[in-house]
Image: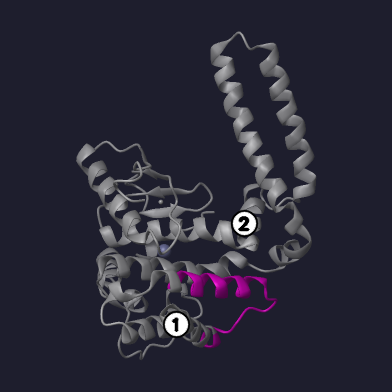
C-alpha cells in the first residue's frame, strides 16, 4: 500500500442523515454503489468517536493509485480493496479534524494553497479581485450564463479570503516554523498511524492492513511495518513513516483482545494532541520518546473514561 499512498501531492447515521458521497468519473454503477455503502457504513461506525466530514468527493481514476489528496480533499478510488480504501478515507477523517482542531495544520494548508506566499501580501489582491467580479456581475446581470460563471468565481474567492483571514493571526506564531521545517514530513507518521488504527478498528481485524499492504505491494518486507504485533521485535526506520509507531501499535494489540475494542476517540485525541506538540516544537520529539508518550496518554485517556 506504500506505493499507493500519497496524502499530499501536495466523511452520520444512515437513518438520520443523507449520504453525502459525491462520485466523479465512476462508470460502473455497481462499483459506485459498493463504495457508497462501504463509506456510509464506516461513517456510521465513527459517529460518537470522532467528527466525520459530511461530504466526501471521490474520483475513479484507475490509472492512479487509491489515495487521498489533502490539497483538494478528494479521495481517488482505483480498486476495490476495502482496507486500503478505508485507510485513505481515514486520512480524510484525520485531516478534516486536524484542520478544525490544530491551528498550525490549518495554517499550513492555507499557506500551501497559495504556494507558501505570505498571507498579508496575497490577501489584498484577492479582495480587489472579488470586488471586480461583484462589479462585473452587477453590470452583466442580464446574462444567465455569465451570472452562473461570475457567481462561481465570487463563491471561490470569498472562500479563499475567509481562509486567509482565518489563519492570518497565526502568522506570528507559525510562519517561522513553516519556513524552516518540513512539517508535512513530521505529520506523515501520525497520519499513517491514525489511518491504520481506524481501519483495523472498523474491520475488527488486526491483520487487515498488513494483508492489504502485502496484496498491493507484493513485498512482505515492505509491508512488515504495517503489522500490529503482540511481540514487537521490529526496529523503526526513520525514513519509513509506517515504522515510527510500531511500539504503540504493538501496545494496542496487547491492550485489547479485539481490534474493535480500541477506543477510537482516545486514539484520535492521543495522536492529534501529540502531533500538535511535535509540530510546534523546534526540534520535534524522538520516535522512541513519542511511542512512550502515546502509550501513556492513551492509557490515561482510557482510565479517565472509567472514572465515576
Ligand atoms: Zn496512508
Q: On the rendered image, what quadrant is the N terminus found in? A: bottom left
- At horizontal 32% and vertical 80% (from top left) the residue drawn is 228
Q: Residues within 10 Å of mark 2 (few under 14, many from 20)?
A: many
Q: Nearer the viewer, residue 260 or 163?
A: 260
Residue range highlighted in magenta = 267-289
Q: Quadrant of residue 92?
A: bottom left
Estimate the x, y position of residue 223 in percent, counting from the top left.
33, 74
Q: Nearer the viewer, residue 153 or 305?
A: 305
Q: Nearer the viewer, residue 204 or 50?
A: 50
Q: Quadrant of ligand 1?
A: bottom left
Q: Is residue 272 rendered magenta in the image?
A: yes
Q: Nearer the viewer, residue 251 or 81?
A: 251
Q: Is residue 268 something one can see in this rendering?
A: yes
- At horizontal 77% and vertical 36% (from top left) the residue drawn is 125
Q: On the rendered image, what quadrant is the C terminus found in? A: bottom left
Q: Residues within 10 Å of mark 1 (few under 14, many from 20)?
A: few
- At horizontal 33% and vertical 46% (from top left) the residue drawn is 16
Residue 275 is marked as none
Estimate the x, y position of residue 133 in percent, counting from the top left.
69, 24
Q: Secondary structure at mark 2?
A: helix
Rounded to the nearest angstrom, the CA distance separating label 1 from label 2 is: 33 Å
Residue highlighted by disc 1: 307
- The residue at the far top in this view is 142
Residue highlighted by disc 2: 106
- At horizontal 79% and vertical 39% (from top left) the residue drawn is 124
Q: Secondary structure at mark 1?
A: loop
Q: Is residue 294 rendered magenta in the image?
A: no
Estimate the x, y position of residue 168 in percent, counting from the top left.
74, 52
Amino acid at each position: 500500500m506504500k506505493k499507493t499512498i500519497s496524502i499530499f501531492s501536495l466523511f452520520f447515521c444512515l437513518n438520520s442523515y443523507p449520504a453525502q458521497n459525491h462520485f466523479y468519473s465512476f462508470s460502473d454503477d455497481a462499483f459506485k454503489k459498493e463504495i457508497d455503502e462501504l463509506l456510509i457504513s464506516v461513517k456510521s461506525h465513527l459517529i460518537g468517536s470522532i467528527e466525520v466530514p459530511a461530504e466526501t468527493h471521490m474520483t475513479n481514476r484507475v490509472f492512479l493509485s487509491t489515495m487521498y489528496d489533502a490539497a483538494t480533499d478528494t479521495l481517488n478510488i482505483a480498486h476495490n480493496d476495502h482496507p486500503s480504501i478505508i485507510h485513505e478515507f481515514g486520512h480524510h477523517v484525520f485531516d478534516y479534524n486536524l484542520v478544525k482542531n490544530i491551528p498550525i495544520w490549518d495554517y499550513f494548508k492555507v499557506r500551501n494553497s497559495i504556494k507558501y506566499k505570505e498571507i498579508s501580501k496575497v490577501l489584498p489582491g484577492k479582495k480587489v479581485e472579488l470586488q471586480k467580479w461583484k462589479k462585473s456581475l452587477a453590470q452583466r446581470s442580464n446574462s444567465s450564463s455569465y451570472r452562473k460563471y461570475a457567481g462561481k468565481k465570487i463563491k471561490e474567492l470569498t472562500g479563499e479570503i475567509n481562509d486567509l483571514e482565518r489563519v492570518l493571526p497565526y502568522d506570528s506564531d507559525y510562519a517561522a516554523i513553516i519556513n524552516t521545517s518540513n512539517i508535512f514530513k513530521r505529520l506523515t507518521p501520525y497520519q499513517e498511524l491514525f489511518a491504520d488504527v481506524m481501519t483495523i478498528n472498523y474491520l475488527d481485524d488486526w491483520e487487515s492492513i498488513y494483508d492489504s499492504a502485502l496484496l498491493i505491494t507484493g513485498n512482505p518486507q515492505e509491508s512488515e511495518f504495517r503489522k500490529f504485533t503482540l511481540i514487537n521485535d521490529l526496529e523503526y526506520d526513520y525514513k519509513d513513516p509506517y515504522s515510527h509507531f510500531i511500539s504503540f501499535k504493538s501496545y494496542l494489540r496487547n491492550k485489547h483482545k479485539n481490534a474493535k475494542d480500541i477506543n477510537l476517540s482516545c486514539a484520535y485525541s492521543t495522536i492529534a494532541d501529540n502531533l500538535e506538540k511535535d509540530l510546534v516544537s523546534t526540534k520535534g520529539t524522538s520516535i522512541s520518546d513519542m511511542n512512550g508518550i502515546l502509550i501513556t496518554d492513551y492509557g490515561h485517556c482510557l482510565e479517565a473514561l472509567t472514572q465515576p
